[in-house]
Amino acid sequence: MLKNTLNTLQLLCEHFRLYKERLAQIDAKLEEMGAGRSQEYLDRLTQLQEQMHIRTQVSGMNNCIHVYTNFTKQVHCTSY
């Protein structure tokens, strides 16, 4: 019975140690991200910025097409 209790305590201590170790890793990663030094964060941020740039360009093209289409409709209607 005592041996079982000791094994359980050892197991709990090991789990707690691993938990604290993982928590320290997460805190370090959050600190890196907050300081803008996390390469994983910076890579994803770069991807998102590129996607935003592309979408902005496409949106601008769509806007130009829409303006051109409306303009040609107005010219067509007023020319008669």
Image (cartoon, grey):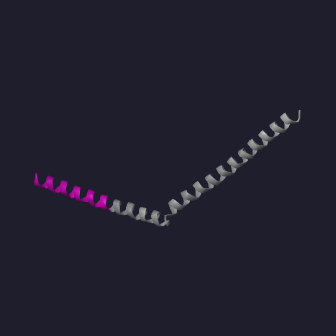
Position of residue 33 measured from the top left corner of the image (x, y, whole percent):
46, 63
Instruction: Give 46 or 70, whichever is nearer the viewer.
Output: 70
Position of residue 63 measured from the top left corner of the image (x, y, whole percent):
71, 45
Position of residue 9 measured from the top left corner of the image (x, y, whole percent):
18, 56
Instruction: Give 44 or 72, whichever is nearer the viewer.
Output: 72
Residue that sits furthest to the right in the current view: 80
Direction from residue 10 to residue 73 in the image, left or right? right
Is 5 contained in the magenta span?
Answer: yes
Task: Report the magenta stretch's main SS.
Answer: helix
Direction from residue 12 to residue 2 in the image, left or right? left
Image quadrant for the C terminus?
A: top right
Residue that sits furthest to the left in the current view: 1
Q: Residue at (88%, 36%) from the top-left corner?
A: 79
Q: Is residue 1 above or below residue 17?
A: above
Magenta stretch, residue numbers: 1-20
Q: Residue at (39%, 60%) from the top-left corner?
A: 26
Is 32 contained in the magenta span?
Answer: no
- Residue 12 location, quadrant: bottom left
Direction from residue 4 to residue 15 in the image, left or right? right
